[in-house]
Amino acid sequence: IWNHTTPVAIKTLKEGTMEVEKFLEEAAIMKKLRHNRLVKLYAVCSTYEPIYIVTEFMAHGSLLQYLRDDKGRRLKWNDLADFATQQVADGMKYIEENKYIHRDLAARNILVGSCGAVKIGDFGLARVINDDLYEAKQGSKFPIKWTAPEAAMYGKFTIKSDIWAYGVLMVEIFTYGQIPYPGMSNCEVIAQLDRGYRHPKPPSCSPEMYEIMKMCWKKEPEERPTFEYLYSVMDDFSVATQATYNPIDD
């Protein structure tokens, strides 16, 4: 409990798991980025080890686990379209406007609170970008099935690679947390994407929503939409379905 009134989550740097500098770098990014669709940072305790990051508590945990649980599986199409994709697009629009990239946008890093609120978390790979490009160090590891081809093959990250990941996140949402590209290895995914293959439409996804996914997966990064555009499109979906929206129970 923070200040005797607010439930919080505490992230601890366990000895040997990662460098102190990288852990504190994540906290510094969270401090700079303040938006109601991003997990809020309350404090960093770094005077003594172990080091703690104190953040907002999200009652239902990760979106990935939530989608796989009974409550998540009861969500209808309009719930999925509004409560996750539109809200995430709002948060990513803010990140885009502030010249940052997330680099690990996936359901496991989206957190679910009460009343249907979702927020973007885990800024361990986030970076500020200069000249709209961030080049990862050689040997860096990425979650291949969520990573844009130009980033997976050449280590070139832009906000457009986050757009690609957003399309894969939509697959996770509309399949209730299934792993993308089922039955395919990472190497097969990279090879098939290079040949023009794209993830098929999830059964619970509308043709219109799938068209948005495919826009996110354009081969040329500059042909992919912006998060500003995606947010406006998702907001239209939200308005269209609001009459039948069912909020999440606590």
Image (spheres, grey):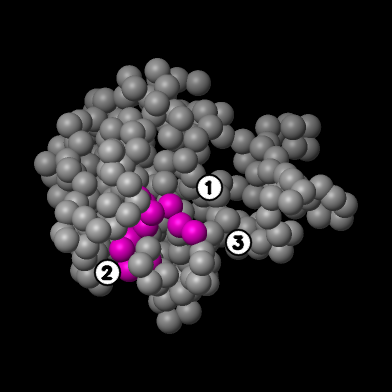
Q: Amino acid at mark 3?
A: Ile
How far apart marks 3 and 2 lie (CA) works out to 25 Å
Name which quarter of the figure residue 27 lies in: bottom right
- Is 208 displayed left or right of 102 in the figure? left
As measured in the structure, the alpha-carbon distance from the residue carrying label 1 to the one carrying label 3 is: 11 Å
Q: Which residues are magenta?
A: 141-151
Q: Which residue is at 69% across, 50% downward?
A: 17
Q: Quadrant of residue 33?
A: bottom right
Residue 61 to residue 224: above or below: above
Image position of 10 (left or right of 244): right
First in sequence: mark 2 vs mark 1 = 1
Q: How many marks?
A: 3
| Residue 29's disc number | 3
Farthest residue to the bottom: give it: 131
Residue under the point 88% across and 52% down: 48
Residue receiving disc 1: 121
Q: Is 64 inside the magenta-drawn segment?
A: no
Q: Amino acid at mark 2?
A: Pro
Residue 150 on the magenta span:
yes
Residue type, label 1: Gly
Tag 1's secondary structure?
A: loop
User: Would you call the spot at circle 3 few (<14 residues within 10 Å), some (14-19), or many (20 or more)?
Assistant: some
Which residue is disc 2 drawn over? 221
Q: Which mark is residue 81?
A: none
Of label 1 and label 3, which has the lower sequence position? 3
Q: Check whether the beta carbons of the residues at disc 1 and disc 3 lie within 8 A of each other.
A: no
Q: Position of residue 223 (x, y in %)?
A: 21, 69
Residue 31 seen in render: no
Determine whether the residue tagged by mark 2 lies in a helix, strand or loop.
Answer: helix
181 in relation to 198, above or below: above
